[in-house]
Structures are given as structure tokens and as C-alpha cells.
């Protein structure tokens, strides 16, 4: 059974930083890509950042370089460093994993979600 366990969400003030972590487990868990989506109230879920095991990265353009995704050597854990956070970054952030190289930005597995709130 595959599990994605997230941590690191919370309440921060505008301009501050936060790091989200996601670790996958399961005897058959060999993801092709991992990353993060987010969903703000009343909005659709959107891809924030993701990386394939071959090193291809995909970032939401509107972030303007404020977020950085990294993956550990096992290729089963991802970290999202979020800098200069803005109120519009407030959302539930979901870790995902994709198994197929034909659809690396489409989730086969989801984490439970972690709330990020940016407010003064």
C-alpha cells in the first residue's frame, strides 16, 4: 500500500518562508514523478511544482521563482521550499506521485494535504 505523508504546513506572515516535506512509502512505490498541487478556497487545484526522476522540473509560472522543489536521493521524497510567501499562496497543499512517464504531472497517489496560511 502506497502512502504519501506530508508535513510542514502552518501559519506565517507575508514575506516569510516555509518548507513542506512529503515522504512516500510502500513496497511497490517507485514513482516516476513527485511534486505538489495546491487548492485555495473556491478555486481549482493547480500544479505548483514537480520533478521527474530524470530531473525534468515543472513550476507554476506565476510563482516567479519563489518556490524551489528538491528530491532526495531515494527519489521517494520531495521538499518544497517556499520563500517570500504572499497571502495568495494560502491554500491546502497536496503532495502527489505519478507512476507513468507519459503523464508525470497527473497524480496516481495523493497525500492528505497540509494547510498553508499566509496572513498578517
Image (spheres, grey):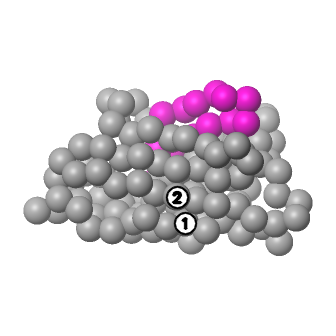
- Farthest residue, direction front: 73
Disc 1 is placed on an element classified as: strand
Residue 42 appears in the rendering: no
- The front one of 7 and 108 is 7
Kindly indicate whether the residue at mark 1 contacts the one at mark 2 (C-beta within 8 angstroms): yes
- The front one of 45 and 64 is 64
Place of residue 120 in the rendered image (x, y in percent of width and height, measured from the top left): 11, 62
What residue sits right under mark 1 in the picture? 6
Disc 2 is placed on an element classified as: strand
Q: Is 46 a magenta residue?
A: yes
Residue 63 appears in the rendering: yes
State how far apart marks 2 and 1 are (Cα).
6 Å
Q: Is 20 a magenta residue?
A: no
**Residues shaded magenta:** 42-59
**Dot 2 or dot 1, earlier in sequence:** 1
29 lies above or below 1: above
Q: Could you tell me how many numbered marks the image carries?
A: 2
What residue sits right under mark 2 in the picture? 21
Tell me what residue is drawn at x 79 percent, y 35 percent.
101
Q: Quadrant of residue 23?
A: bottom right
Amino acid at each position: 500500500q502506497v502512502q504519501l505523508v506530508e508535513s510542514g504546513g502552518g501559519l506565517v506572515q507575508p514575506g516569510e518562508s516555509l518548507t513542506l516535506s512529503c515522504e512516500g512509502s510502500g513496497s511497490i512505490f517507485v514513482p516516476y514523478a513527485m511534486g505538489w498541487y495546491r487548492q485555495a478556497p473556491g478555486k481549482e487545484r493547480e500544479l505548483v511544482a514537480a520533478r521527474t526522476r530524470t530531473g525534468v522540473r515543472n513550476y507554476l509560472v506565476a510563482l516567479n521563482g519563489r518556490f524551489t522543489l528538491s528530491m532526495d536521493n531515494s527519489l521517494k521524497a520531495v521538499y518544497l521550499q517556499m520563500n517570500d510567501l504572499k497571502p495568495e499562496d494560502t491554500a491546502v497543499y497536496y503532495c502527489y506521485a505519478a507512476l507513468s512517464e507519459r503523464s508525470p504531472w497527473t497524480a496516481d497517489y495523493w497525500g492528505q494535504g497540509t494547510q498553508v496560511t499566509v496572513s498578517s
